[in-house]
């Protein structure tokens, strides 16, 4: 399968891409930063430097790769957990406008599978509700991850409140969603 992973250089993406490649998939990994392109090449992906907010360029990039599936792992989170409470505009925009643009690109490319990350905890911001609605409207799969913990996350040395999921486990739980029926799947440690 040809899989376009948007957000491939993120905390889940860098773990997900090698799993997809090892399973025999051909992967394009999109990142905003040209500095991260060599890392994606090393992981086995064809790097795509792009901006989810440049709709025309995004559509061209996705269409040219000819994916069977698109995985949406895009976020715009600040560096610290404390900032994540107050600095929400970037991530809200990814969830609304970014999701809309990525869905348009997936449709233009004829991709028949769409998996998008979301969150498993409450309360949910209106942008998260909009994001999930958009994905479900195209018969996609919403992956509601618990709070991520482990290397590279906000919770490297401690457990977050539930629902939670270890970062490697979150990545491993994602590829099977390419074959899941439309709907919402919660990915979290057992309570």
Image: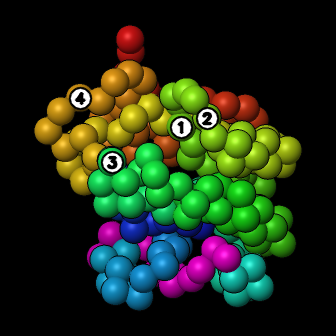
Alpha-carbon span between mark 3 and mark 1: 17 Å
* Circle nearer the N terminus (3, 1): 3
Residue at the limit of the structure toward the left, as seen here: 157
Disc assigned to residue 127:
none
Colouring convention used in this rendered image of the protein: rainbow
Mark number displayed over residue 124: 2
The answer to which of marks 1 and 4 sits earlier in the sequence is: 1
Q: Going by the image, does 105 lie left or right of 11?
A: right
Between label 3 and label 1, give the one nearer the viewer: 3
Between the residue at mark 4 and the residue at mark 2, the CA separation in whole angstroms equals: 21 Å
Q: Earlier in the sequence, mark 2 or mark 3?
A: 3
Task: Mark 3 vs mark 4: give the one in front.
Answer: 3
Secondary structure found at label 2: loop
- The residues tagged by marks 1 and 4 sit, at their Cα atoms, a distance apart of 16 Å
> Which residue is tagged 1?
119
Q: Earlier in the sequence, mark 2 or mark 1?
A: 1
Where disc 3 sits, the SS reads helix
> Which span of residues is magenta-colored?
42-53
The residue that disc 4 covers is: 159
Q: Is residue 149 visible?
A: yes
Quadrant in the picture for residue 4: bottom right
Q: Residue 82 got which mark?
A: 3
**Label 2 – label 3 distance at C-alpha:** 17 Å
Quarter of the image with the N terminus in it: bottom right
Q: Residue at x 73, y 64 (%)?
A: 97
Q: Position of residue 165 (x, y in %)?
A: 36, 31
């Amino acid at each position: 399968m040809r899989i376009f992973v948007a957000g491939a250089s993120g905390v889940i993406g860098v773990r997900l891409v090698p799993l997809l490649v090892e399973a025999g998939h051909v992967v394009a990994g999109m990142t905003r930063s040209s500095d991260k392109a060599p890392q994606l090449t090393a992981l086995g992906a064809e790097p795509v430097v792009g901006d989810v907010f440049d709709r025309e360029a995004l559509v061209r990039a996705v269409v040219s790769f000819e994916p069977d599936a698109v995985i949406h792992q895009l976020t715009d989170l600040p560096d610290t957990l404390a900032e994540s409470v107050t600095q929400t505009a970037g991530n809200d925009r990814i969830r609304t406008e970014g999701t809309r643009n990525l869905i348009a690109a997936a449709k233009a490319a004829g991709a028949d599978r769409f998996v998008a990350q979301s969150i498993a905890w409450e309360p949910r911001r209106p942008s998260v509700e909009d994001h999930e609605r958009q994905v479900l409207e195209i018969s996609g799969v919403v992956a509601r991850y618990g709070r991520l913990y482990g290397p590279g996350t906000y919770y490297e040395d401690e457990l977050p409140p539930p629902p939670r999921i270890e970062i490697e486990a979150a990545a491993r739980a994602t590829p099977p969603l390419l074959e899941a029926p439309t709907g919402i799947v919660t990915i979290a440690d057992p309570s």
